[in-house]
Amino acid sequence: MFIDYDIIIVGAGHAGCEAAASAANLGSRVLLITMNMQTMAQMSCNPAMGGIAKGQIIREIDSMGGCSGIVTDQSMIQFRMLNLSKGPAMWSPRAQNDRMLFSSKWREMLEKTDNLDFYQDLVTGLIIKEGRCFGVITGLGHKINAKAVVLTNGTFLNGKIHIGEKNFGGGRVAEKSATGITEQLVSLGFESGRLKTGTPPRVDGRSLDYTKMEVQPGDKEIAGFSYLNIPKPKDQKCCWITYTSEKVHTILKTGFDKSPMFSGRIDGVGPRYCPSIEDKVNRFPERERHQLFIEPEGWNTIEVYVNGFSTSLPEETQYEALRNIIGFEAVKIFRPGYAIEYDYFPPTQLRYTLETRLIDNLFFAGQINGTTGYEEAACQGLMAGINAHQKIRNFEPVILKRSEAYIGVLIDDLITKGTEEPYRMFTSRAEFRTLLRQDNADLRLTELSYRLGLASQERMELVKSKSESVEKIKSILNEMPVTPEEINPFLETFSFSTIREKQKISKILLRPGIELNRLVAHFPVLNEKLKNYSSEIIEQASIQIKYEIYIEKEKELVERMGQLEDLKIPETFDYKKIQALGNEAREKLTKIKPTTLGQASRISGINPSDVQILMVFMGR
């Protein structure tokens, strides 16, 4: 019934879809197995993509030839660039999406992908022989052979859903959990754990009074996520903001005795940075209110997502609390919020390629590695799919450095530090965030992906054109002088100090608060010179000029730190023989097996003196 495949992807969430697309587009024969073909790439939680640091990840996926950015642009109902009041290293794109359109666009894209087959079934086990994975076993009893397998099981491994005192098995509401895989992997020597996540109730938008809420419109100019020219929506949906109150908090507290979180019925650890509403009320008793974002779920649905009200309290408590929120007095609930706990495998058991250390040709991606969020899952799927393809063909692995991409930061954090709670990406996790901006992901990564055969010729030509245009604009700004008579009226208008002699436009641009678009509007000559360039290109040139000093400093730091990254450590290196290392250092180094001194230096509990000792023993 089944042919032998190059790669089998288990699970069709965000990680699974990106893994299947990348491996198939590189030329591998891929089978994507999912329990439900109707929920591929489903937005299980909020109907949105991007946000702080997450938006950078989606742009990196797009630059690498992935699909999440394209699908996001095709299905968005609102776009906002966050953190514009801060420097460009902090700017982060975010889109509100049509949930059903997002899923259907992903499926449509996958169905048009060559080398990719689909099968609907539950995977209950893996075919393992002599420390290597050779395929999967399904719930219907099929044994399907493959050279490599990528597990992207999300929250389905022994998933259990909690609503108040009720609990039942499930990977998502109305979908059964997956059993068998955890038990088999643990029997092979893998370490597993339990994590928790939650989701808020969905409500009938017709029952809400939006006149009592704060409106949150989208940006006038939609930048989008993909660097390809994907048509953007002409209109946008509004989101809304409202708040809880002390009365709402009092009502929530009446259900605490039946809360699975407080009663101990949930074993898993929840996400620190996306707590449930009951957790917020409990942890911050001094807060009189908490902000809620009211988000439509699509163009043609009345369903609304109550962002910020994640909960697993009893249904009656949820309903009573919601009715006391401003604008929710007549609310009707489509389905209650719930918590879900599930198995994961601490990611210190992985290599940089996301291949497991214990079993060759077995890869993990997504929430199985302890992460939370569509974006974090998608980028792992992309890299696992790429590296599974590379591995079975004996090609060099593709490993992104911390200085190259947020994807590199995420994977390095996971395998070096591990996680005991759902891992979420933030800009603060990156040491080189001035280099890792959302606006330059294509300049950073497209050439690498093009060499692999993943990014298209079209993408490569767009990057070359962008790079050349940016250099031309920078040349214009570096060469064009302005006199005091020309510039001082402009400077005085915005309360900037005036100049006494000629200066280049680029030098004026270095002043804090002066933006290139203002200068262009003030100087007709400059406007004429730049009229044929897009706003994206002009913005890129402006950023490179204004932040040149900071960019160069980070590049110097990358170069210095790169010296440690270049010092390779053999996988068979015996740390136990180095008596000068403390017990903690020997244990952690032996467990994680860092591949470079740079990675060793980032392991929690490894101090600079430990690194110096390692350098001595390695003849450095």
Image (tube, helix red, strand yellow):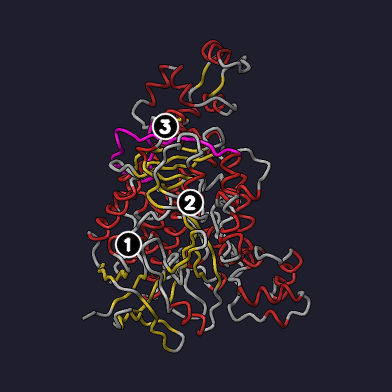
Q: Position of residue 217 (x, y in %)?
A: 41, 32
- Neighbor class of circle 2 (other Cα within 10 Å; few <14, some 14-19, many 20+) is few
Q: Secondary structure at mark 1?
A: helix
Q: Say which amino acid is labelled 1.
A: Ala
| 3D distance between C-alphas at marks 2 and 1 | 43 Å
Asked which quadrant contains residue 451, the reply is bottom left
Q: Say which amino acid is labelled 2.
A: Glu
Give the residues in magenta. 221-246
* Whether residue 239 is visible: yes
Q: Quadrant of the N terminus?
A: bottom left
Q: Which residue is mark 3?
A: 210
Q: Say which amino acid is labelled 3.
A: Tyr
Q: Which mark is residue 472?
A: none
- Magenta-drawn stretch contains 237: yes
Q: Closer to the observer: label 2 or label 1?
A: 2
- Neighbor class of circle 3 (other Cα within 10 Å; few <14, some 14-19, many 20+) is some
Q: Closer to the observer: label 3 or label 1?
A: 3
- Neighbor class of circle 1 (other Cα within 10 Å; few <14, some 14-19, many 20+) is many
Circles 2 and 1: CB atoms closer than 8 Å = no
| 3D distance between C-alphas at marks 3 and 1 | 40 Å
Left/right placement of residue 478 relative to residue 136 reads: right
Q: Which mark is residue 21?
A: 1
Circles 3 and 1: CB atoms closer than 8 Å = no
Q: Compare marks 2 and 1 and give the one earlier in the sequence.
A: 1
Left/right placement of residue 9 relative to residue 93 reads: left
Q: Which residue is mark 2?
A: 316
Q: Closer to the observer: label 3 or label 2?
A: 2
Q: Secondary structure at mark 2?
A: helix
